[in-house]
Image (tube, helix red, strand yellow):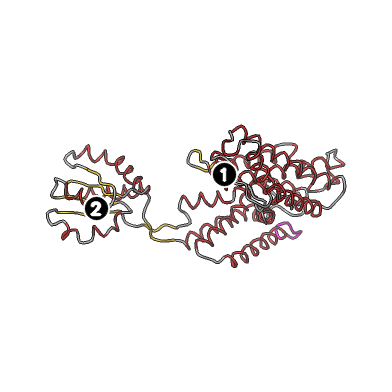
Amino acid sequence: MAWLSRYSILAILIGLCVAFSMATLTKQQPNANDAAEQILRALRAGPSQGILVVSSDSRDDREFGDAFRQKWGAIEKNDPSRTVSYAAGTPQDVRKAIDGSSDERLTLVLSPDTRNWKLFEGVAQKFPKKELRLVASEPVLWPNFLKYQNLINVVNQIVIIAILAIGMTLVILTGGIDLSVGSLIALSAVICTRAVQDWGGGEQASATSIFVCGFLALLVCGIAGLINGLLIVRCQLPPFIATLGTMLIASGCAFILSGGQSIATVPDSFVWLGRGTWLGLPVAVLFMVGMYAITHVVMRSTVYGRAIYAIGGNAEAARLCGLPVRSLIASTYVISGLLAGLGGLVMASRLKSGDAKYGAMYELYVIAAVVVGGTSLRGGYGSVLGTLVGALIIAVVENGMNLVHVESYTQKVVFGFVILGAVLLDRQSRSPTA
């Protein structure tokens, strides 16, 4: 049963990916490299004659043309007599290129976009003076779910929830809860964009000004987290009540500062954190992965991490062992507040604006990610990597249901069962009979 409690969440994620892959299996055009490789194999087996590569001006066709050029070199060395020319543009442009070709026997290499052009229906009648052979890539069976761009979207869409879930994991490991994170997203976004608009130069703001304004938003959210911690450890308020009050205060402040309006007077460079890419991957995703790697090391290999687990297991025993229990608990709420503020900056950057309505219901999705990831609501058991898997499960379920056209109301029912199932699994895996 211990093995089940450790690996069941990962098995669920893999199972969901397999299920949605099977459900979205369809015939579709191969990517640029595979299409070019298919066509080159057909050209090697065909007669030696002139070749005209036909493509439109779309991005996919440009990638196909580049891939074909790169792979053609080897064939050209073995058979220099086989000349290749390229025609890109509209069907009219391609017709002119075919008519103007000096080759009477011509192989037309069709790109994924041009293979369905009406120009190539009945080519013998349309080009009676030419002997034309059409070569195109064949569709392949591949799941829409496993397309590269869709997988990137799955990860990218849970970046904000996953960042907040790191702080929520620490809080729940101590036996607490933080309901204020959703409102702190809105407060952070509004403070940052309002500061950029009023003090940072607006649409002409420099990178330094944006950084300072973002730091101000993080500072305010960190202070909100500190207030949560002090209310809980000093005033002995239940975490649910303390963070509920902070949630309402933060939401109200966000509406007051924004006047109930969206704030969008920010420069184009403001979107770098939310929409930028590096090495072909979204900056926000890389940032999230780095944060999880660091937090995992901290929680597993440092005194602070072990102390958080000890407090969640038995706070009184931890106190008797000399741990500063109240300070450590308060620190988890500060971290949660800071990460909520960071999530607000990512959302503001992604949407290029700040709005008091951002983050609505996010606290529930964050808690769901933590619980689905195997962290016990009683504290003392769980991991940040499990939380990441939990966030991915939520994203996969949402994305997969969208791909198979499940209506939004039904999706809510499914999410409810996913959360209930995760909690029941948590109780079962740690029951005395397990």
Helix, strand or loop status at disc 2: helix
Nearer-the-camera pick, 231 or 302: 231
Which mark is on residue 92?
2
Q: Residue at x 31, y 47 (%)?
A: 37
- The amino acid type, in three-letter code, at marker 2 is Gln
Please report the bounds of the magenta region as a residue range. 428-433
Question: Which of marks 1 and 2 precedes in the sequence?
Answer: 2
Q: Is residue 431 magenta?
A: yes
Nearer-the-camera pick, 384 or 153: 153
Q: Is residue 92 left or right of residue 275?
A: left
Q: Point out the residue furthest to the top here.
A: 208
Is disc 2 surrounded by few (<14), some (14 to 19) or many (20+) residues within 10 Å?
Answer: few
Indicate the quadrant containing the C terminus: top left, top right, bottom left or bottom right. Answer: bottom right
Residue 317 lies in what quarter of the image?
top right
Read off the residue under disc 1. Answer: 274
Helix, strand or loop status at disc 1: helix
- Would you say residue 402 is visible in this rendering? yes
